[in-house]
Image: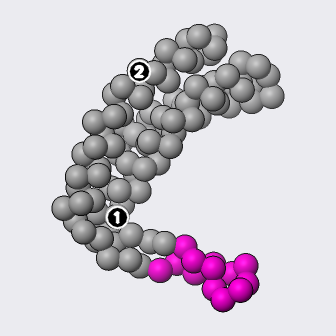
């Protein structure tokens, strides 16, 4: 699944990097925003399951320094969340493809 996500992300990046300063580039970026966010959420859930914990970033005291904290996960809930995200992937990919076609990308 990661290979598919990596390839999809590469294709999305190619489409978006076409030209973010032109109307087509802006259109492509808007068209793929939801897909990119979904792919990132899937990757995060997969990584959490592989590690057995999630990583949260927190500000230390009142400063701008950030520390990473390991947070235990409920494996069953994380698996359910991942399954739900993966269910949405096909439809979201299709919407992004359609929107990209409308952009002329």
Instruction: Tell me where residue 20 appears, x and y as whole percent.
Output: 74, 30
Instruction: Tell me where residue 11 appears, x and y as whole percent.
Output: 52, 29
**Mark 2 = which residue?**
94
Q: Which mark is residue 48?
A: 1
Quarter the C terminus occupies: top right
Quadrant housing residue 95: top left
For residue 9, say whether it is visible.
yes
Check the image and report above or below for 54 versus 24. Answer: below
Q: Depth check: 25 or 6 in front? A: 25
* Residue count near mark 1 (Cα–Cα under 10 Å), binned few <14, some 14–19, many ≥20: some
Check the image and report above or below for 46 versus 65. Answer: above
* Residue count near mark 2 (Cα–Cα under 10 Å), binned few <14, some 14–19, many ≥20: few
Instruction: Tell me where residue 26 appears, x and y as whole percent.
Output: 72, 26
Q: What element carries label 1?
A: helix
Quarter the N terminus occupies: top left
Does residue 48 appear to the left or right of 8 in the view shown?
left
Quadrant housing residue 21: top right
Image: magenta residue range: 57-69
Does residue 84 appear to the left or right of 101 in the view shown?
left
């Amino acid at each position: 699944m990661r290979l598919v996500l990596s390839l999809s992300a590469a294709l999305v990046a190619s489409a978006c990097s076409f030209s973010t300063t032109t109307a087509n580039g802006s259109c492509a970026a808007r068209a793929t925003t939801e897909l990119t966010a979904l792919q990132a959420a899937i990757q995060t859930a997969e990584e959490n399951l592989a590690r057995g914990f999630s990583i949260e970033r927190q500000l230390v005291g009142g400063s701008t320094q950030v520390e990473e904290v390991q947070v235990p996960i409920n494996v069953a809930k994380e698996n359910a969340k991942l399954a739900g995200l993966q269910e949405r992937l096909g439809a979201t990919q299709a919407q992004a493809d359609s929107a990209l076609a409308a952009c002329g990308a």
